[in-house]
Amino acid sequence: MDILGRKINKVGVIGSGQIGPDIALYFSKVLHSHGVPVVVVDIAESALKSGEVRVKGKIGRGVRSRTFKQDEADAMIANITWTTDYSQLAGADLVIEAATEEVGIKKKIFAEVEKICSEETMFASNSSHMEPEVIFGDIKNKQRCLVIHYFFPAERSIIVEIVPGKDTAPDVTDFLMAFYEQIGKAPIKVKSRFGYAIDPIFEGIFIAAVLMVEKGMGTVKQVDAMVQKVLGLGVGPFTAMNLTGGNPIVQHGAPELHEKVMPWFHSPNLLENQIQFGIPWETTFVPDEVAFNENVFQEVSAQIKGAYFGLVCEILDSGISSIGDLEMAVESALVIKPPFDMMNRMGVDSALGLVKAYAEEWPGFKVPDVLVKQAESGKPWHIPVVFREDRDEIAVVTIRRPRTLNALNGEVMNQLRTIFSEIKEDNHIQGAVLTGFGIKAFVSGADIQMLAGIKNPEEGEKISLKGQETLNFIENLGKPVICAMNGLAFGGGNELAMACTARIAKRGLRVLAGQPEPKLGIIPGYGGSQRLPRIIGLSEAWPILRSGNPISSEKALKMGLVSEEVEGDVLDACIAFVRKVIAGEVDVKPIKRDPIDIPESLPEVDIGPLSRKTDEILKRAILEGAKLTLEEGLKQEARMFGECVRTKDMRIGMGNFMKFGPKKEAKFAHA
């Protein structure tokens, strides 16, 4: 596997305990098809056997759930070597240590690995707390060393913290950020500090919950359920400690968090007793069955929000992470309502009040300056989900919402408009590339929650027109914008891609582009019914639009929807392509803006169980729009999109999708 001029030919994982096997499982899942073997080393045969059994069990469950085919599962299992022999790590390009959280053990491991591996091998520790400078203090070549912190369960959680030390070479950090994105993770870069960015929040919420139990605000079971409800946690903080075996880690890290983060951190007496007796917390997986007083719930709610907002803002205040990274990582890794959005919804000033009240009650808790200043500004937090990075004269714009596969919502559209406005006015920038984060999707479509919230035709037309404004702006930027279709582009995603000057797709995608709106009981609203016929011809577009079925990257190339289909890095290909456009070496035909011809006959389309009512509206949008200019056709589409809101089938389609997802067909009323 080749990324940024580096190759990964072999990966080593040291430690077959709590998390090492899960790291190895993920590596094997994503790398076995590239011929990259994974070696797991542990000094204990029993640990290796236990880890192997666990991995085989998880892969077996994947086969039964049809996540993996049997031959794929067999290949993943065969790709992992389990051994006590450290020499098997020879030739590894990346070695990750996932052993006990003891600095002496970690240093001993890397002293051994340093003798075996080449000078080019990257060394990483999956420490949950320790600074890379501490772990790798005795390594001769510290430039290749850093922390890569996974979250439970490592094979499923997409977040990894990439924590370089003061001596880590920037190209090593950059490579690993790109590598982890390419294998399906969502890495965030965090500056070196004890605990990094996310664990102080996770452990801080747990400590706050323990303190409330000690205060007598409820039993462990009650506080666990109340905190889960307030913060939208996947499981309560006590349940999470039972699942991850985290009690000793919190106890061990509390003194240094006390010293290096804030004095409030400590190991409460209740935690000390729990560890001494070695028993799990008394919790339940059915929090709704736990009874508690409403007044107490409100008090718990105020306390846990005060702690949560204060902890997150302390991390931001420290400068080790950013708002965008914290918002994404906390929501994804810890399964908590995103903090800055929560504060915006309730008002930043109200959030500050909760933090101040919490700090007054609990000595040593900080009121972060950054929160005070934001409240004083009277403005909500700006939470970036669209990012710009300039590569010389080319601006690379990336939409990053991995939990929704980069789906478009109002905030994404606003940020796209702002960033492209800045690109337009920036005389240094001559062109841009627009892409989506990760490897699965460019943009999966418009956010279903936003669409489902449309109340009437007028609101539907207004939302459609507003989205079209942003796409029209990109289309008419005056500078070439090339879309890097790094994955699927559905609905609004394909419409956004079509507003770009040209599109380049990753080769071999069986599913690349489509307009699945009819399956939801609606029609395209961001220009799909107008741009697709003008780009590939009405006869080709007719069945794609009406059936809602996607096409492959190969078919998109043949039809002319994409200009190229590339084997390697699609982003690099797009940067090279836009430079050719700027230099006049490539002639890109502009989209047809005048009315287009309607063939005497169009292909028959079997719409199956799709709404006949929606189909009639869609056919009108396509055919009437073809007789108009592109500008007027887009307005016509917006009106027709609003018409969908009058139908029963829109509510049926939306409700079905939100309840069952895309795999179950809606039972339309055709009305």
Image (cartoon, rainbow, N blue to C red):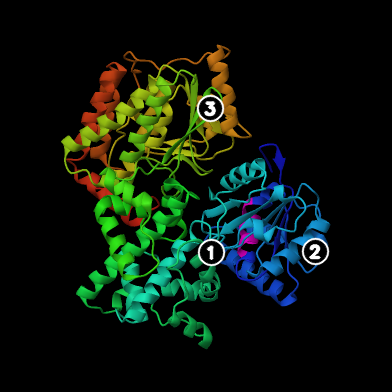
Of residues 289 and 176, the one drawn nearer to the viewer in this rendering: 176
Give the overall secondary structure of the magenta segment.
helix
Secondary structure state at the residue bearing disc 3: helix
User: Would you say residue 279 is visible in this rendering?
Assistant: yes
Quarter of the picture holding the C terminus = top left
Magenta residue span? 22-30
Horizontal side of residue 71 vs 199, given as left or right: right
Percent x, y for residue 315?
A: 45, 55
Q: Pick whichever of labels 2 and 3 is earlier in the sequence.
A: 2
Left or right, 289 with respect to 476, comes to left
What is the x, y in percent for residue 255? 52, 70
Magenta region includes residue 429: no
Q: Taking the image as drawn, is residue 605 in sight?
A: no
Q: Is residue 26 magenta?
A: yes
Q: Secondary structure at mark 2?
A: helix
Q: CA distance from mark 2 to mark 1?
A: 26 Å
